[in-house]
Amino acid sequence: MRERKMLFSPFFFFFFFFFFLIHFSPTVADDGAIMNQLATTLYSIPKDWKGNAYCSWSGIACDKSKRVTSISLASEGLGGTLPPDLNQLSELQTLSLQNNKISGALPSLANLTNLQEVYVDNNNFTSIPRTFFTGLTSLQNMSISQNEKLEPWSIPTDLADSSSLVVFYASKANAIGSGIQNLWLNNQVVGLSGTIDVLGTMTQLSQVWLHQNAFTGSIPDLSKCTSLVDLQLRGNQLTGVIPSSLVSLSQLMNVSLDNNKFQGPLPAFGNGVKITLGTTNNFCNSKPGPCSPQVTALLAVAGKLGYPENLATSWGGNDPCQGWTFITCDAQKKNVTIVNFAKQKFTGSISPSFANLTSLRNLLLNDNDLSGSIPSDLINLNQLVILDVSNNNLSGPVPVFPKGVTLKMAGNKYLGSNITSGLGGEAPEESPQSSPIADSPTGSGKSSSPGAKKSSSMSSGLVAGIVVAAVLVMVVAVFVIYKCYAKKRKEKIGLVPLPQNEKEIGKNGSVGTANGYGGFGGELQSQSSDNSDVQVFDGAHVTISIQVLREVTNNFSEDNILGRGGFGVVYKGVLHDGTQIAVKRMESTAMGTKGLSEFQAEIAVLTKVRHRHLVALLGFCINGSERLLVYEYMPQGDLGQRLFNLNKNGYPPLTWKQRVTIALDVARGVEYLHGLAQQSFIHRDLKPSNVLLGDDMRAKVADFGLVKNAPDGKYSVETRLAGTFGYLAPEYAATGRVTTKVDVYAYGVVLMELITGRKALDENMPEEHLVTWFRRVLINKDNIGKAVDPVLNPDDETLGIILKVAELAGHCTAREPSQRPDMGHAVNILAPLVEQWTPSSQNEEDDYGIDLHLSLPQVLERWQSEGTTSIVGDSFYNSSSITSRGDTQSSIPTKPSGFNDTFNSTDCR
């Protein structure tokens, strides 16, 4: 009876209800149901999307509770529609469906509070619900661009709830602006990115301030913005041709376009318009007027590609035969004969304007991400010999080229097909030319023949044999995966040893051809879910599982954030043994080509360099669309925090001794990069926020995402403009060409900041640029005391040392690169100011009892017999205590002991 009362007690009912709620809740089943709906409404889905094990489907990642956290299906040739209940995947963090042919209505994403990234650009969606942005409180990156079939929609006020939003792309998506008249988004701390196409729909605009951000792309058609008076776009990364619609605005009075990379004809604004153009734009002529026909054609080509930054940087002037990248001309340097855009990661479409380059012989567009069709205008290129469009996302019919044209088209799944918009789960309708031609010497596009149908049909026996073989392979694969998973469950998740075989690197990373970022040609293709890792590049740097990084950062808690940057957030992590690390977390789809290049560059450079004054890379992780870098932790933050806004940061001011020591540390680190490492590099982004400090206040240079291979000798290398305004050498900002002297210039600016406590660019000061002001101070050296940071209050002796450093800063920031010293000279100037050494007297040396007439073995024997102990005897001759004390070498960073590296090469990932 007592047991029966206990069985039916209220407490037991509550316990039973709670147990039922946990174990029989339909939550997990709901994820499975939604995923099955997704597999039904889409067509051309991955082949392994079968059964109920949706967490193992290609492109799907789940957590330990089998909740879907990531759907990553970019550029998979998908068609069909999305299920309306997609927002029931309540743990979803990443939705990546860009570059497909999905149509119909976008589903509501309302209340997906964990959702951080949404990429649905380059599809055929037709409508967007009002609740699409509702409750997306964790949203960081959103791209809905290139959906031209969308019905007009307004950017909703719900987007204001997405307080973490950094990137928002909505170009060519029929977004309608509101009644905003004044739009002020200048000088954002993070630097807003994306295009500014939405301005063209905001018809009530009067004043637009978008200067000092990171906006890209071109200026949209502003013909509807008839009330626009003031447009400030300086200090961005805008490219393309200045539209005539801007020039013709009747109310316009003030325009700033400087510090961008605009191209095409010099705009001819009216007499009443105040215009600043600066020196960084690459207009074809110095006076208003049309560009040459070939330049006009090539700019139209660039327009179809979205005016890529690397073309905007190098395509200047009115003659494409004068050093334009990717362009080759005939012997007379008059006509373009080759355009080689291969492997540039270009997006967009193929421009019919190629047909205006009448002397074109070779057109190489392979291995990009181009979409659309091959323009029929290209058949009019009478001298065309090779057209290579392989490995893109092209579709549509293939033009019939003349005989003698080699047409390469492999790797375009739908080229030669007429793809329907796709409703429901219908398969694409194929044309008679549905079989793409790989390498057709005639380019006719006719690959079928009268016997083709017969040859393509197979006997039922052969089909049955293939099916049986496939089933056996799947059984074996499932068995191997299960065994590996069982083994992995028994081991603690941790570090993975790196492959020593370069071929193995090629499978998982990307060795590729050199592109200025340490030899990495493309994105690291292999990805891992929560339960897998990726092989990497060098035995001193390892991959770290995402589970470990989540554990040590408290699941990337807000409380662990050390800082935010343009491509991600840095978190502090603490291992089980107390070792502290810094984890930089980024998203590959949000970063785009530029961000991925910086991720690869960090790995590529830091696997080649090791120095006591360079921040050590401990490892990295690729998890789905996430890219994570793990560094040694620098507990005292960065130099910028210590120099500026002391009241806000709560740090005590740096003493002069600390400042000059930091200056020497930075000089040694950069000197090593320039000429003492196994390969020479240019940092390109030297500034206080990239100088990190340890507990001993010794400095290390960080952030190698913009590092460039240094050319030999005094030669310069051409590259896209990158870095931070205020630290850019004038010749780099003007021409885009770099040598190691651009780092010397930036270092000189940092020295000025150390001396004065002023920022390189300070809008609150009468003279905004520090270098300009400081040079005037140096003209009369008696004024140097007035320029010194007031918190230093130096005595006369210290002031004399400061003057030496100030003179060095002046030389480092000389206008001409040839007038700047190298970093070795800076080390030689600063080292005596920090490490003062004086010889001991002869009597003191005699105290050691060294007889210079004895040989070294005799001295050792004598010391041993006398039982002498000394630093030399105890450490220098003890192999277990030898340490590296040189500036060009430091001990290899050890693996954090909190990580386990028991995995071996047989592990399944």
Image (spheres, grey):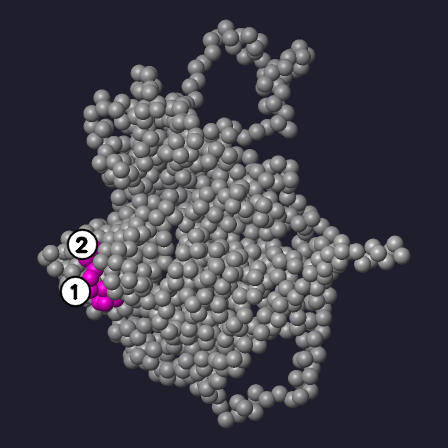
Q: Residue at x 42, y 60 (%)?
A: 158
Give the secondary structure at mark 1.
loop
Residue 125 highlighted magenta (yes or no): no
Q: Residue at x 51, y 34 (%)?
A: 635
Q: Earlier in the sequence, mark 2 or mark 1?
A: 1
Most distant residue in the left direction: 271
Give the quadrant of the C terminus: bottom right
- Residue 775 in percent (x, y) is at 23, 32
Viewer-closest of 906 and 101 = 101
Viewer-closest of 750 and 422 = 422
- Residue 279 in percent (x, y) is at 22, 50
Q: In which quarter of the view is residue 576 placed?
A: top right
Give the secondary structure at mark 2.
strand
Which region shows up in magenta?
Answer: 221-231
- Residue 804 in percent (x, y) is at 31, 24
Mark 1 burial class by Cα count in 10 Å: few <14, some 14-19, many 20+: some
Mark 2 burial class by Cα count in 10 Å: few <14, some 14-19, many 20+: some
Residue 281 visible in rendering: no
Name the residue tied to disc 2. 254
Q: How many marks?
A: 2
* Structural distance between the alpha carbons of marks 2 and 1: 13 Å
Name the residue tied to disc 1. 248
